[in-house]
Amino acid sequence: MSSSRSEGCTLTGALSITTAVRDAVSIIHGPRGCAHHNFSLFHTVAVDRGRPPPRILSSMVTEKDVVFGGEEALERALHRAVQMDPACIFVLTSCVADTIGDDTAMVCREDRPVPVVHIPTSGFLGGGFHDGERNALIALATMEDHGRPAREGPGGITLVGEKNLEYEVDQNYAEIVRLLSLLGVEVRLRFVREIDSREVGLLGRGSLNILRETGLTPVGEALEVRFGTPFISSFPLGLEGTLVFLSQVAESEGKTADPALEKEKRRQRALVEEFGDIRGRSVRLEGVTDPGEQEAVRELAELFDLSVDERGASLPLPSPFPAGTSGVRRVLHRWRARTRA
Amino acid sequence: MKQIALYGKGGIGKSTTSANLSAALSDRGLDILQIGCDPKRDSTRMLMRGRLIPTVMDLVRERGDRSLTLDDVVFEGYRGVRCVEAGGPEPGVGCAGRGIIATFQILERLGALHGDVVVYDVLGDVVCGGFAMPMREGYAEEVYLVTSGELMSLYAANNICKAIKRLSSRAKSKTRLAGVICNAKNLPREDELVARFAEQIGSTMVQFIPRDPVVQLAELNKMTVIEYAPESSQAGAYRDLAGKVLENTRLDVPEPLEIEELESLAYEFIAI
């Protein structure tokens, strides 16, 4: 078990990936409750963002299925899912299905008119949110044979594991696109963020994978083994981190980094000047545990000569820390508001 | 109402012992309910003249649990012994332990759990909480361990002691060990060995049941020994057991042995 249960079970993590495949249906093999509380969350997020509700089905395992085995309940759910005419079906398992020993993988392997992908989850038995997220990404990586490539030709960047439930997901994406444009490269695939299942076929064609966070390193490694694609282990954090990120991408893509670095440094200098009014403030910094995020916060504290004092203004420390120079700008805006309060 | 449960290793003869015990108790004019808790549903077969009665779980599978009536699940056998089989899923799927729990809930809802003596004939070993249900929920107040002198049989009995000890520590638990029944395999000094085992776990051997071909003969004729050969010494052993069960007031919290202690004990009695 590699992640905290307080963040939710594997189902929620895996659904944050599978429901981002627009033409798919996700089945939760377990009691209705497992689907209900997850559906509520994803439905709320979708409505908030003006998107259609997620297509999530439950196999509706009852006590009778617990006693006699739930594989037939899953069969029935798969039949219902096929009627919805999806491009593919993802099957996720709850604690209950694994406790009673249903052979979910075997049921998923049977011939059907629609590809069925089994995502190893097992509810809380399988770990926490991040385990589900990682397992879903790795399982989806085996799907590339199911869809035809949407675009021909090699190259381009693949973003891996964007946090679909994150409030700033689109702003972070825009920042990555901006940074990559400085080097003249572009994102070819968002794995997985609002794509069609056939686009997964592009996964093996990317020249570089950029992971959202270091916790996804096992996914980066799995993709590297499968497709030979190198990876950068996280979105850029902090000012120096952004420059390092540009250098890493340039090196991997065979580009010259200097012009992009010069342009970005100018942007960063302007940013530091713009927020000069928070310089020297007395602040409290606490709560960030990720080493990369800690480094980004430490960098800003030093850059603006913030004195850390328990009686100082409590600064909001966003987690996850937003990406790139633009992310730093958003953090500084919040800090300015707090130090003025 | 006396509620007893027979636990022990698979194949040790719990169903034969249970059925003959129920028959012997019934001969005394008592109202007996025997509940088989094994998915292979052969606990009550000899009481039913060889008939395999529908199991509660089969009926739940076919009709759901809401439409079941008492007559659907309780069948009258030898001398009015009321017979129930819990049943369970096919091997390798689902959760038979949960099936046992569901069965007990249904029997309780239908008002089936009454009589002078309820005999629970439970699966070979306590493999999960579901099979410990008769103990855990206080249905089985008196547990009898059925064992022979074979090491693995004693090992299973010792494991069940662990469950009894754990469950009896709960505040509301009424479950206690009532004794050990030796269902002999005709090993040398088997009665001594099982009696020593019973003593070492803090209990007593309540009955030695010798191995006798009449048991096989009765089963081939689809009857209990009590019914098939009532004058036999084997039937006498079962009647003795019935009398002791009725009179027994000794209830203990057992102290299970360490595996090394169990092996040392068995080693003392092995014939080389």
Image (cartoon, coloured by chain):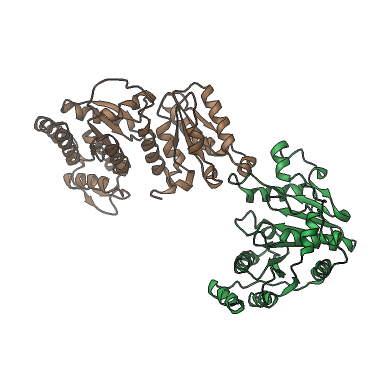
Q: Position of residue A147 (x, y in %)?
A: 37, 24
Work out which quarter of the rendered image holds the C terminus of chain B and state it.
Answer: bottom right
Q: Is residue B57 visible?
A: yes
**In the image: residue A9, left or right of residue B269:** left
Which one of the lettered chains is coloured brown? A
| Picture layout, residue A111 above or below residue B43 | above
**Which of the 4 image quarters holds residue A13?**
top left
Nearest the viewer among B107 and B123 is: B123
Q: Is residue A58 left or right of residue A20?
A: right
Residue at horizontal 59 percent and vertical 79 percent from the top: B268
Image side of residue A145 versus residue B153, left or right: left
**Residue positioned 24% across, 35% down in the render:** A229
> In percent of the image, x 78 and y 55: which residue is there?
B220
Residue A136's spot in the image, x, y percent? 40, 37
Q: Quadrant of residue B142?
A: bottom right
Q: Seen in the image, is A26 located left or right of residue A143?
A: right
- The answer to which of B215 and A319 lies nearer the viewer is B215
| Position of residue A175 measured from the top left corner of the image (x, y, whole percent) | 25, 30
Relative to A141, is B92 above or below? below
Return the residue found at the far right.
Answer: B29
Q: Nearer the viewer, residue A63 or A273?
A: A63
Chain B is shown in which shade?
green
Where the N terminus of chain B falls, by quadrant?
bottom right
Q: How many marks?
A: 0
Q: Is residue A40 visible?
A: no
Residue B79, percent across and down? 88, 55
